[in-house]
Amino acid sequence: MATIAEDRPCIGVLLAGGQSSRMGCDKALLDWHGQPLIEHQLATLRAAGVDALRVSGERPAHRGVADLAPQLGPVGGLMSVAASVTAEAELLVIPVDMPRLSGALLQRLRTERRQARSVAFAEHVLPWRFRLDAASRALLQTLAQSAEKRARSLRALQAAMETEALALSKDEAAQLVDCNTPELWNEMSR
């Protein structure tokens, strides 16, 4: 018998709408082993077995979902992606600047604790899987309207969703390094 979670499609969401201010150039277009990082990350989501893809951010070449309300960060991006999805779904969210992620690790995040509304790896905000339904849509709207920046963070959203934590091995944790400065990028891309 299929569970409720198995009936919902899993949509891979790539957060690629940031300003890359610490990097000094568009992170999504950085070369990762012969291809733009955005392409590499989309391939990683495909390898995780998602049913569909969404790119958060104004990325015409990738049919990106532009922010409905600019300057709200990742919560605003997720709110905009949520508005582009009409039915309930599981969203598997990754950042564009985490090139060591593997499809296998994301597959684990997709499949473990299927009944949980929200799951991330212990001590990490991203990657993250959560159920997109009426409750999470309302929560996204509420947080996006908050005047306080901290209230609009992914951490605040995950806390409100009572996100469950999955343990990581040392090798798995090594995949969850984000490259948001030139120094980190140079170290990672060697």
Image (tube, grey):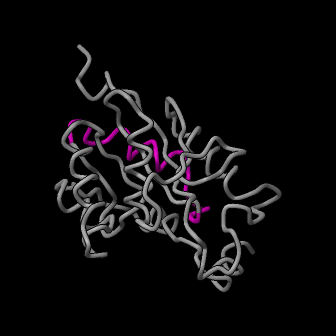
Residue 40 as seen in the image, left or right of residue 90? right
Position above or below: 73 against 130: below
- Residue 173 x %, y %: 44, 66
Q: Quadrant of residue 120?
A: bottom left
- Residue 47 x %, y %: 58, 39
Magenta residues (range): 97-116
Question: The C terminus is located in which quarter?
Answer: bottom right
Position above or below: 150 against 119: below
- Residue positioned most to the right: 34
- Residue 43 x %, y %: 64, 44
- Residue 97 x %, y %: 58, 65
Position above or below: 47 against 17: above
Residue 155 as seen in the image, left or right of residue 108? left
Q: Quadrant of residue 74?
A: bottom left
Residue 57 as seen in the image, left or right of residue 127? right
- Residue positioned most to the bottom: 183
Identify the residue at image location x=25%, y=42%.
113
Identify the residue at image location x=31%, y=70%.
123
Identify the residue at image location x=58%, y=38%.
46
